[in-house]
Image (spheres, rainbow, N blue to C red):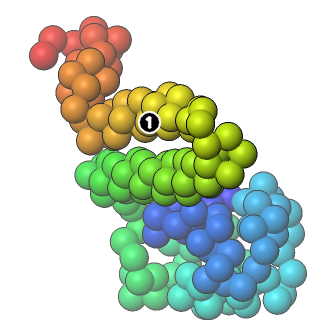
Amino acid sequence: MLFQKLRLQRGWSQEQLADISGLSTRTIQRLERGAAPSLESLKALGAAFGVDLSALKEPDVTATTSSSDITSPSVVSADEALALARVRKIKGFYIHLAQYCVVIAFLAIVNLMVAPRHLWVIWAALGWGLGLVLHGLQVFDRIPFLNAEWERAQVEKQLGRKL
């Protein structure tokens, strides 16, 4: 749990921590579930987090190290967490867009090679394109009933508060 806390404080995914530390993603997952780390894993994670090796052996790094030992703040603010979540949604949209472009281009080539008189690729492009447009509208808060303001209002309603 300590490793997960440090990772989340920095806003890293398990894959990013694995890349930075040189460990496998599977090892990161095992350690976050409470498996005992090897000395080599502790060294790699200590280097990745920028903390002393002995600090990783303690139950709580923030209690055993000074603020100068840890390069990021000990608590992620609510604004930072929201900004991070928003950036991840935007990243997801751009990944979706890239997948769309690659797959539709491949299907268009196949369609033109196999059946150039019947352009069935248009139906795939239109169907997936509609989903992509809706995803983009949702990510960039252009759909009035699915944007952040609507979510905030629903949370306030569930909590019984007035706006």
Amino acid type, residue under disc 1 in the picture: Gly
Q: Nearer the viewer, residue 3 or 131?
A: 131
Q: Nearer the viewer, residue 106 or 46?
A: 106
Image quarter of residue 7: bottom right
Residue at 15 percent of width and 11 percent of height: 162
Residue at 76 percent of width and 80 percent of height: 23
User: Residue 9, position in %: x, y?
Assistant: 47, 64
Residue at 46 percent of width and 64 percent of height: 11
Is residue 79 placed above or below 139 in the rendered structure? Answer: below
Residue at 81 percent of width and 65 percent of height: 26
Q: Identify residue for label 1.
A: 129
Is residue 41 placed above or below 1 in the rendered structure? Answer: below
Is residue 39 placed above or below 37 in the rendered structure? Answer: below
User: Residue 69, position in %: x, y?
Assistant: 46, 88
**Left or right position of 139 against 99:** left
Image quarter of residue 154: top left
The answer, for residue 55, to whether it is visible in the render is no
The answer, for residue 26, to whether it is visible in the render is yes
User: Residue 112, position in %: x, y?
Assistant: 61, 48
Which image quarter holds the C terminus? top left
Disc 1 packing (10 Å; few <14; some 14–19; many ≥20): some
Is residue 13 placed above or below 158 in the rendered structure? Answer: below
